[in-house]
Image: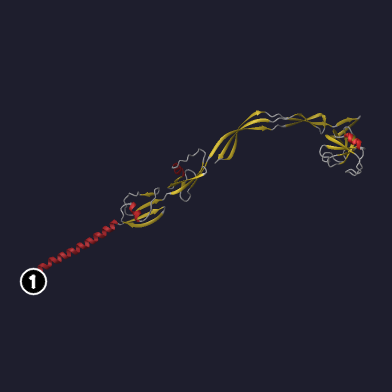
C-alpha cells in the first residue's frame, strides 16, 4: 500500500510543476506581447514635440487618443490612415489665415506655409503685369507674417494742349531817344500738343512722363526797339540828355508851401517821382520848357510829373497831357 501511494504522489508533483512552468511562460508571453504592442512615438505640432506611448493602430486613432484636433487644411505626415510604427514621428503643420489686401478690400484664405505666388494661385485674384506684390511671389508666407499686399499699377496715355511762350527781342533804334521803348511787333504764343504717360498706383497718380510733343503753331517773337539817340533840338537849342521818358503831366500853382528840396516853387519847378527822376535833375519838358526836379507829390508816382505855373488859370488850362521829358546831362 505504501508503494502504491508513492507512485500516485509522483505524477501529481509533475503536473504541478508543469502548471507552474506554463503559468510563468504565459506571464512572460503576455508581458512580451504587451511590450510589443505599445509603441514609443513623437508628435510634432508646428515644431513643438510631444513624446508619448500608444497602443493605437493608426495615426488618426493616436491623435484622437491624445485629443489633438486636425482641421481640414492642416497637413498630417504620415496620413491619418497610416499605421503607427515603433519610434515613429507624426508631423502636423497647422493651416493659418493669410490676409490679402487688394482693390481696397481684404481677402482671407486658409493655407499652409507656402510661397506667396502659390497662395495667390488658390484665389480668383487676377494680377496685372506691373502690379506690385509685397512680399514677393517667391517669399515663403508663414503665420508669423501672414499679410500679402497687392498694389494695382495701371497706365494711360493722355494728350493735352500747351501754350508756347514767345521770346522778346530787343533791337537798337538810332531814331528813338535813349530811354524810350517802342513795340515793333507784338509777340504771339505758340501751341503744342503733348502726349503724357500717366502711371497710377491704386488709382492715385504717382508718375507723369512726357512721351512726345507736336508743335501745332510756332510762337512769334516780340520785337522791342530801344532808343539810343542822346541829342535833341528844341526851340533852336540843342542839348544832350541821359534819358527820355514818356509821362503824364499835370500842373499846380502857388500853395504857400516850399518844395521838397526847400525852395519856393517858381516857373521851371517840376514835381517828380524820385524813383524815376532824381531830385535836382535838370529837365526839358515838351510844351513847358527847361526846368528842374525840385518837388514831389502824393499823387506823383511812376511816369508822372507836375509842372509849376504862376496862376490857377494857367494850371487849369494845362490840364492833363502826355509829354516827353528829357533828363539832361
Q: Quadrant of the N terminus?
A: bottom left
User: What percent of the width, then of the height, locates residue 265?
Assistant: 91, 41
In the image, residue 15 above or below residue 240: below
Between 232 and 205, the one nearer to me in the picture: 205
Q: Dividing the picture into quarters, in which one does residue 170 lie?
A: top right
**Which residue is painted at 28% across and 58% down in the image?**
35
The residue tagged 1 is 2
User: What percent of the width, then of the height, locates residue 148?
Assistant: 49, 45
Between 307 and 189, the one nearer to me in the picture: 307
Q: Is residue 74 left or right of residue 296?
A: left
Callout 1 secondary element:
helix
**Which residue is painted at 8% across and 70% down in the image?**
3
In the image, residue 264 above or below residue 60: above
Please identify the residue farthest to the left as the structure is shown.
1
User: What percent of the width, then of the height, locates residue 100?
Assistant: 48, 45
Q: Dividing the picture into quarters, in which one does residue 7 lie?
A: bottom left
Q: Is residue 56 left or right of residue 23?
A: right
Q: Quadrant of the C terminus?
A: top right
Q: Is residue 20 left or right of residue 279?
A: left
The colour scheme applied to this rendered structure is secondary structure
User: What percent of the width, then of the height, locates residue 295?
Assistant: 87, 41
**Which residue is painted at 80% across and 29% down in the image?**
173
Q: How many numbered discs sit on the rendered protein? A: 1
In the image, residue 138 above or below residue 220: below
**Which residue is painted at 27% across and 58% down in the image?**
34
Instruction: Count residues near mark 1 (Cα–Cα under 10 Å), then give few for <14, some for 14-19, many for 20+.
Output: few
Amino acid at each position: 500500500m505504501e508503494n502504491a501511494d508513492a507512485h500516485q504522489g509522483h505524477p501529481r508533483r509533475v503536473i504541478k510543476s508543469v502548471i507552474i512552468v506554463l503559468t510563468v511562460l504565459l506571464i512572460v508571453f503576455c508581458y512580451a506581447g504587451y511590450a510589443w504592442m505599445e509603441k514609443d512615438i513623437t508628435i510634432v505640432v508646428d515644431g513643438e514635440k510631444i513624446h508619448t506611448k500608444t497602443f493605437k493602430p493608426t495615426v488618426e486613432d493616436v491623435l484622437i487618443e491624445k485629443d489633438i484636433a486636425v482641421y481640414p487644411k492642416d497637413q498630417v505626415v504620415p496620413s491619418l490612415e497610416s499605421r503607427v510604427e515603433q519610434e515613429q514621428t507624426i508631423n502636423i503643420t497647422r493651416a493659418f489665415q493669410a490676409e490679402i489686401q487688394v482693390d481696397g478690400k481684404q481677402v482671407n484664405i486658409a493655407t499652409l506655409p507656402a510661397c506667396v505666388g502659390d497662395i495667390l494661385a488658390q484665389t480668383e485674384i487676377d494680377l496685372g503685369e506691373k502690379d506690385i506684390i509685397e512680399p514677393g511671389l517667391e517669399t515663403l508666407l508663414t503665420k508669423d507674417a501672414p499679410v500679402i499686399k497687392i498694389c494695382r499699377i495701371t497706365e494711360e496715355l493722355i494728350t493735352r494742349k500747351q501754350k508756347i511762350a514767345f521770346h522778346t527781342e530787343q533791337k537798337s533804334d538810332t531814331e528813338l531817344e535813349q530811354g524810350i521803348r517802342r513795340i515793333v511787333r507784338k509777340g504771339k504764343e505758340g501751341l503744342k500738343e503733348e502726349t503724357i504717360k500717366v502711371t497710377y498706383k491704386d488709382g492715385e497718380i504717382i508718375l507723369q512722363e512726357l512721351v512726345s510733343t507736336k508743335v501745332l503753331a510756332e510762337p512769334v517773337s516780340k520785337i522791342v526797339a530801344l532808343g539810343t539817340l542822346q541829342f535833341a533840338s528844341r526851340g533852336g537849342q540843342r542839348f544832350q540828355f541821359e534819358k527820355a521818358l514818356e509821362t503824364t503831366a499835370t500842373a499846380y500853382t502857388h500853395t504857400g508851401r516850399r518844395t521838397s528840396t526847400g525852395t519856393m516853387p517858381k516857373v521851371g519847378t517840376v514835381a517828380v517821382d524820385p524813383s524815376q527822376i532824381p531830385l535836382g535833375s535838370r529837365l526839358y519838358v515838351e510844351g513847358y520848357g527847361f526846368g528842374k526836379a525840385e518837388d514831389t507829390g502824393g499823387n506823383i508816382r511812376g511816369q508822372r510829373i507836375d509842372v509849376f505855373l504862376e496862376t490857377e488859370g494857367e494850371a487849369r488850362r494845362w490840364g492833363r497831357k502826355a509829354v516827353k521829358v528829357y533828363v539832361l546831362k
